[in-house]
Amino acid sequence: MEFWQLSCSQRRLSCRNNLKQIGAGLHSYHDAFRVLTYGWDVRGRFWSANLLPQLDQVFLNRTLLPQEDGAGNWSANGSPNETACGTLLDVFRCPSMPIARHVNNGGIPGRVPTSYRGNAGSEASSDDTSTIVILGTKSLEMLNQDGIFYACSRVRFADVRDGLSSTVFVGESLTDPSFVKDGQGMDHWSIGSPQADPCRCDGGSAGTEFSEAVGTAIVPMNLRKHNPAAHGRLMELSFGSYHSGGAYFVMGDGSVQFLADTIGFQVYQAMFSRNRGEVVVE
């Protein structure tokens, strides 16, 4: 059913249920491996790809090729990896997102935009160290993020010392590949990325566009809506949604919360760090 055929409450419920499934998938993954999946690896494979078996997509997961070159590249014409990036999975799409289901992007025909990104923390203001927007902050190239999903991350539930029920794992994003500001498109995707490949897990500078898979709380949510003058890199990192008044997030305990745009910024940021000892009260 098209999004315009659903009522607002139906779209919200469907979006909430998507995140509930993703949260359950993350718990299942952790039960199996005793650690959460990385945000992305040295091939640009995203956390969402590793979650496919837990989301009843075992066959699609088996089609993904591990090679670093040739047919294993995400944009290799006709490759299984390219096909996977163009496979629509309803669990990664909020029905309130009024954009095309398939978009030609990054050398991938019919690439599928996603509504949901992982939480990389509250400290990074850019994908690349060379383009950090806020002085004194980090980039997503750096390995010591304070969130859950980042380059080659291996976060365990036990590492989330601020409490699973108080820490965001995955949230909505105001995805729109056609909107570009300061050279940055609001393009967020699942499965994998030719631009994030090759990432280096030694902290070296390689790869880019990691914000395709994760966002941060370096700025308030829905930044594009509320501060059109903000830098495009910060808009790209901001979480948000096509719902009015806020966005949905799945917490570490698997519960789904709707956070209002009016939430205090310090409280909001505290929900994105895993072990900084903040007390979340709002």
Image (cartoon, rainbow, N blue to C red):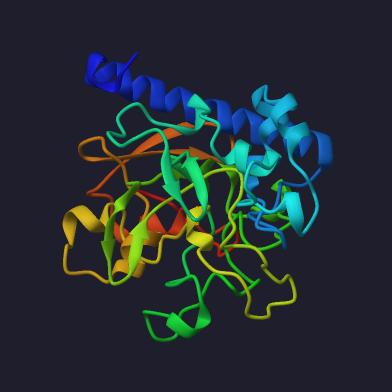
- Image position, residue 47 (x, y; %): 64, 47
- Image position, residue 7 (x, y; %): 23, 16
- Image position, residue 142 (x, y; %): 61, 75
Above or below, comparing residue 118 to residue 250 in the picture:
below
Name the residue located 73 percent from the left edge and 33 percent from the top edge.
61
- Image position, residue 241 (x, y; %): 31, 42
Comparing 13 with 205, the one in front is: 205
Q: In the picture provided, is 274 more to the left or to the right than 65?
A: left
Above or below, comparing residue 58 to residue 176 in the picture:
above
Name the residue located 31 percent from the left edge and 62 percent from the top edge.
235
Report which quarter residue 159 is drawn in.
Answer: bottom right
Disc tally is 0
Residue furthest to the front? 77
The quadrant in which the N terminus is found is top left
Does residue 120 appear in this view? yes
Above or below, comparing residue 80 to residue 38 in the picture:
above
Report which quarter residue 24 is drawn in.
Answer: top right
Q: In the picture provided, is 266 more to the left or to the right than 276?
A: left
Q: In the picture provided, is 166 more to the left or to the right than 11?
A: right
